Image (cartoon, helix red, strand yellow):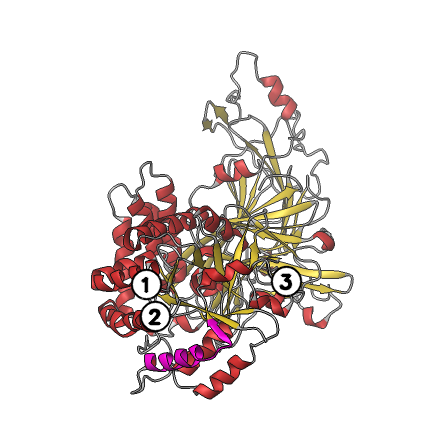
Amino acid sequence: MCDLKLYLIFHLNLAYSSIEEDQRREVVKRCYWPLLRLARRFNLPFGIEASGYTLEQIQAIDRGWIDELSFLISSGPCEFVGSGYAQVIAPLVPAEVNAANLRLGNQIYKQLLGVVPEVALVNEQAYSAGILQHYIDAGYKAVTMEWDNPVRYHPEWDSEWRYLPQYACGQHGEEIPLLWNNSIAFQKFQRYVHGDMDMDKYLSYLSTLFSDQPRFFPLYGNDVEIFNFRPNRYHTEAELGNENEWKRIEQLMVRLLLDEKIEFVRPRQVLENLHLPGAGNRLNLASTQQPVPVKKQGKYNITRWAVTGKNDLEINTSCWKLYNELRNKPHASDDDWRYLCYLWSSDFRTHISRKRWETYCQELDNFHAKPGSNPALITSDLLSDSSEHEERQMSSPPMRESVGRQDLDSMRSESECPGQVPSQAGAWQGETFQEQSIETLRDFSTSFRSDGLCPGRNDDSPVISTPSTSLWADSGRNLVTAFESKRCEPYTCEIVQDDSFAILETHFAELTLNCKKGLAIEALCFKEYSNQKLIGTLGHGFYDDISLGADFFSGHIIFETPGQPKVTDLDFIRPKIEQRLNEVEVAASIETPFGVIEKKVTLFLNKPQVDLEYSFDWPSLPVGSLRLGMITLNPDAFDPSTLYYSACNGGFRPEKFQLHQTNFDHGSPVSFLVSASQGVGMTDGSIVLGDAHRAIHLQVDKTQSALIGMVAYKEIANSYFCRVSFSAKEMDETCGFRNAYRTQSFNKTFRISITPILNGEQR
């Protein structure tokens, strides 16, 4: 029988959510000093991990502790493990912030400890393939990630691989050596230390780990602040008895040191065994079902730091605004980026106390008001203009001949500059629209000409409308012609509307909205990309499967709160249709039990794009789950064998996940208390859903609302169900269920842009 080699990584975090700042000195005394004394006394090769921020705080409290740690890692048995300046949840923040966090963390490590660590512990074990490149760029030689969750969706993995070092691989050729953490193992360790498991029972558990093959096992890889101290996060926390818990840890270490079949090693020593049989496999830890694996049981998932807590959506949105400002600031300093990393720390998003929450909100406001910042960028609820960004991502298909184009060409003299049209019937003069006359076509349901020209006119001149003309919802057919100032080309929108549907057709798209269901998208076809609808509504009975025996709409919202009926916007409405220069907007006001939702659907005339906008004016948002922008794929329009979704999860490049032969729902509840099980970070603001030929690109503005994505997929005989939605709020135990946090008014606007992509086009 081979020796069992054990390694431990103790995670130190003075920003711990439920620990008050005035308790930090006590934590250093009761938790951090005993750790170092134990390592020194028994020459134990502990891995000790802390953020740069935690080291700064410890130094301010007790410089002697920093000196002792420096000695133990330079001349003693210990190894320092890095994580970054702050405990940032990497799959939820922009790539530039992740890169800055690791770089700035290394600066503090070098400054205070005189070392730059080689091994990193992934913060909260919240992993994505995209973040690997950041660790490589920061000089790390290995990362530490939990085994238990990734293996759930990789049944092809050999169970022996958990005992050996491997390689974690990204999707673009990057790879880095991998050390395993183990949630069951560190929870067993905690149970022993807290007195829930006696020594014999714990040693019996360890005895199951011995093998004829070499094994390296992570005995512990989690918090230190829970030993001999209680952060008071949960009512179920073990009581702190009279026995010193560090004494129990010491007794265990002594027993293990006396066992000749057990050897303690530093974390980086494990990496020396990548050559062993069964080691060095190149593994993709993420999966389609779980793009962002996180440690521990299902309630501990990525939504925890994204859309739960006291008000995660709002503070994450504020951080996105600050990030956007720093990117555009010519001389943003390391201090600016360091403070942004601090503001993005995970602990402000979970079990934070009221006192610390109020302090954090003040810190957020203070950073907003720093010299050179624009408070309006932070506090305004107005949508940032992302049209320029979207134009860069996708160029419009070639323009077809449209109504009146030849006439406009003939009116333009050779001396006229491009971008100018003679001022007839209202036209562009330079860059300004000059209104001179208006023609609006109405009620031509029987006499509308098939060539798209206006009946009853002697010429074929186009019909010009002003950018602000409104068409109230009455039945009939209307023709809208608009001009794009840069090109002087007319774009038309044909509108057919009755009590049930509003059908809008442009050169680029045909959009059908269901007026009986709150402007749900009945069908959306992008003409240059497919001859059938790509997304829309799948009616009751579409699937020959009772588990899917419902209507599956697109473009709607769903809000669910415990003990109450589901709230949607699927009500009968009379839409207001408003035509502007390059777009047609269909709007409605929808009453719900919690307040009004102002909904707008915008079809662009000059490019293939549809925008969905939801404005909430609710006195409060109860605890629950709010999902919006549901997009249901037409299964007849996409090839199931090549169907995928892709998004950035903290990296510079998107991660692609194949859907074929999977069955999952990121939005499925874990329990009555935890409303979702997974999410997609969308850290460039977008998610793509498509196949080898075409795709739908969905874009949100994170500086307006920091939504996350959720994908659901199920294969049914000869078909499949596929939907993406966007979560603004989920429910778990971090929400608090306190009146002080439930009564906040909810005045938010969300916008989602839908555009098509052909295979090979840039996102």
Q: Are marks 2 and 1 in contact (CB under 8 Å)?
A: yes
Question: What label does residue 309 carry, if any?
Answer: none
Name the dominant secondary structure of the magenta segment: helix
Identify residue for label 3: 277
> Is 305 above or below relative to 105?
below
Camera sees residue 195: yes
- Label 3 amino acid? Pro
Query: Which callout, 1 or 3, points at the residue further toward the start of the chain?
Result: 1
Which of the 4 image quadrants contains residue 148?
Answer: bottom right
Q: What secondary structure is found at the residue carrying circle 3? A: loop
Which residue is at the front of the view, 685 or 332? 332
- Label 1 amino acid? Leu
Identify residue for label 2: 39
Question: What label does residue 72 carry, if any?
Answer: 1
Assess whether residue 731 is covered by the magenta stretch.
Answer: no
Assess whether residue 254 is covered by the magenta stretch.
Answer: yes
> Is 33 above or below relative to 363?
below
**The magenta segment:** 246-263
Which residue is at the front of the view, 223 or 7? 7
Alpha carbon separation for disc pair 3 and 2:
32 Å
Q: What secondary structure is found at the residue carrying circle 2? A: helix
> x, y (%) of residue 348?
35, 63
Q: Quadrant of the C terminus?
A: top right
Which residue is at the front of the view, 185 or 376? 185
Q: Residues within 10 Å of mark 1 (few under 14, many from 20)?
A: many
- Label 2 amino acid? Ala
Q: Residue at x 63, y 62 (%)?
A: 277
Q: Are marks 3 and 2 in contact (CB under 8 Å)?
A: no
Q: What secondary structure is found at the residue carrying circle 1? A: helix
> x, y (%) of residue 518?
56, 58
Which residue is at the front of the view, 284 or 713? 284
